[in-house]
Image (cartoon, rainbow, N blue to C red):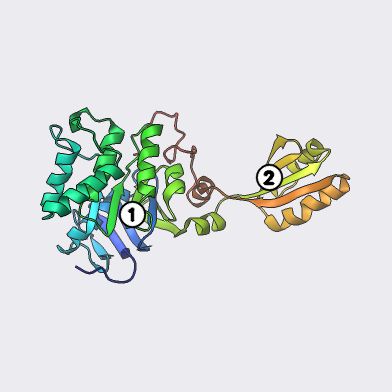
Amino acid sequence: MTVQDGPAVESVALLKSFGSGANALDGVNLRVPQGSVFGFLGPNGAGKTTMLRILTGLARPTSGTVRVLGYPVGDPHVRGLIGYLPDVPAFYPWMSADEYLRFCGGLFGLNGSTLAARTTALLDLAGLSGVTTRIGGYSRGMRQRLGIAQALINAPQLLLLDEPTSALDPLGRRDVLEMVGSLTGRTTVFFSTHILADAERVCDSVAILDHGRVVTEGSMADIKSRFGATHLELEVVGGADVLAGRLRGADWVTDVVDHGGGALVLTVSDMAAAERGVPAMVTALGLGLRRFEAGEVSLEEAFIDVIGGTVTAGAPIGRTPPDDGRSVR
């Protein structure tokens, strides 16, 4: 089946209601560029898994339209063009990785040299070549890498990943993210996650979902430029501590960090006022200005600006501090 031109995923006014009074998805409009690693971000419970279930045909929308690779979602022919890794994948523990991939390939009608070559390539991609241990003895990270490999066995045009790093330790996360990053340009990856650092590392475009609604969507650079606090980095000769004290009193400065050696990083609410005010203060204090430039906004800052809440870099995003003992999933 030929993939049509246009976005890999497109939804218009997508609504999914379970009859409880709240909509899991509430008028979602989404466009996922083909060939991108697309981050689908949001707090736990925002509706990300519901969206994935609709894209795979495992759930039906209440209203609205969804197209996958140019075809209506649920089209039986599309199923052979997508790969899917659920948030908690299941395996046959008595199989080896090689046996499992061959089994999955057989479900798509693959056999002979085609299946053998694809299995070998995917075992190498997953870092499981030569591993003869049965899957029941695998670590969580090994299982996740194998899960991505099985989702790629049919050479899909769209790979759907549901929280692939959420339960992994740092080494496991690194390995899975490297695997996802290696797919850039080879297929479209729809990467659902609530871990901002992971999305920032591998995604080139993102959408942020909140209470079932897409609140913003765009390239990573675009999101960072449109949202989040604005940073200014400067370096002065002499009297940086005095300048820092003066800056903290300015109404357009929300934070000042002194890194020593004359280097200051400012968080400002009004860039135009800062661009006028900082040089004026430096001149008034008789200091030398070595460097004065805008700093990059992080995805974390952009997310907080869009949705709000408490976020820890590299940790799941949610609406309550991570130490309050409550789950946000």
At 38% from the left and 43% from the top, the residue drawn is 177
Would you call the spot at circle 2 few (<14 residues within 10 Å), some (14-19), or many (20 or more)? many
At 27% from the left and 69% from the top, the residue drawn is 70
Spot the residue most to the bottom: 5
In the drawing, what numbered circle is on residue 119?
A: none
In the drawing, what numbered circle is on residue 266?
A: 2
| Rendered view: 71 above or below 124 | below
Residue 248 spot, x, y in % from top left: 74, 41
Question: What kind of element bears circle 1?
Answer: strand
Disc 1 versus disc 2: nearer the observer: 1
- Location of the N terminus (image quadrant): bottom left
Q: Nearer the viewer, residue 229 or 162?
A: 162
The answer to whether any part of residue 322 appears in the image is yes
| Rendered view: 38 above or below 8 | above
At 89% from the left and 45% from the top, the residue drawn is 286
Residue 118 placement, left or right of 8: left
Residue 105 placement, left or right of 164: left
Residue 260 spot, x, y in % from top left: 73, 34
Q: Nearer the viewer, residue 157 or 133?
A: 133
Image quadrant assignment for residue 66: bottom left
Identified by mark 2, the residue type is: Leu
Identified by mark 1, the residue type is: Val
Would you call the spot at circle 1 few (<14 residues within 10 Å), some (14-19), or many (20 or more)? many
Residue 237 spot, x, y in % from top left: 82, 41
| Rendered view: 156 above or below 145 | below
Identify the residue position indicated by label 1 in the image. Answer: 189
1 or 2: tag closer to the N-terminus: 1
Q: Nearer the viewer, residue 53 or 110?
A: 110
- Location of the C terminus (image quadrant): top left
At 68% from the left and 45% from the top, the residue drawn is 266
Question: What kind of element bears circle 2?
Answer: strand
Residue 301 spot, x, y in % from top left: 54, 47
